[in-house]
Amino acid sequence: MEIDILTIFPEIFDGPFSQSIIKRARDKEVVTIRLHNFREYSSNKHKNVDDYPYGGGAGMVMLAEPIVRCIESLTAQRSYDDVIYLSPDGELLTQHFANQLSVKKNLILLCGHYKGIDERIRELVITREISIGDYVLSGGELAAAVVVDSIVRLIPGVLGDETSALSDSFQDNLLSPPVYTRPAEFRGKKVPDVLLSGNDREIVRWRHEQSLERTRKRRPGLYDDL
């Protein structure tokens, strides 16, 4: 998979993309992530990428020209499955959505700022919009990092145990069951006997029951949709 991220703050990604699962995926060359500062595509001598909104009002709006020029320079080199804008009014990121994106080959992620992007960018080059939740961030960089992490970990060869992602919360619309490791007893709290029994069938049944109960208590909306 190849992911191109458009941003005016590429340094924000230094931490998330140089550690843990994303670093492993990049080292294995399972995923290639390129950062593009679209300020470099501004024809303005001051390299401005924002201006006041038509009609007045607070805040600034990101200019169409540098963003569209940057995207068009990339799409001239290769075809992309989607050009995605990280936006609070986009399609909500879910595990099912992440599963779909994880099988794509080439993606562009656009990180907005200020009051948003000129609407004509959406009309001309954006094919999909993603929100990571019903709240507003200072910019799209953190949202882009979340999207990248959620899909890259699903690519075969990234996780040490490829079956691990299959038991994550939301993969089957249920929350994950409780998990335990050594010691078998800690400060008076014991690991459930069934997990020590070696009875695989009973363990599977117990985990499913626990997932159902946890979902019912913590996410009743999900439970009601089962």
Image (tube, grey):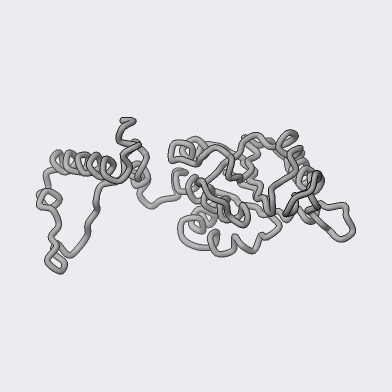
Q: Nearer the viewer, residue 120 or 148?
A: 120
Q: Nearer the viewer, residue 219 or 150?
A: 219
Q: Where's residue 93, x and y in %?
A: 50, 41
Image point 46% across, 56% down: which residue? 21
Image point 13% across, 41% down: which residue? 202
**In the picture provided, is 106 more to the left or to the right than 154?**
right
Image point 50% across, 55% down: which residue? 22
Give the residue at the far right of this rendering. 45
- Camera sees residue 30: no
- Quarter-wise, where is residue 106 in the image? top right
**In the picture provided, is 2 more to the left or to the right than 117?**
left
Q: Nearer the viewer, residue 121 or 203?
A: 121
Q: Is residue 62 above or below residue 120?
A: below
Give the residue at the far bottom of this rendering. 187
Q: Where's residue 25, x and y in %?
A: 50, 53
Image point 76% across, 37% down: which residue? 120
Q: Is residue 186 above or below residue 141?
A: below
- Camera sees residue 3: yes
Q: Is residue 27 above or below residue 106?
A: below
**In the picture provided, is 50 more to the left or to the right than 103?**
right
Quadrant placement of the C terminus: top left
- Number of marks: 0
Q: Nearer the viewer, residue 122 or 21?
A: 122
Q: Where's residue 142, x and y in %?
A: 56, 55
Q: Is residue 161 above or below residue 94?
A: below
Q: Where's residue 143, x and y in %?
A: 56, 51
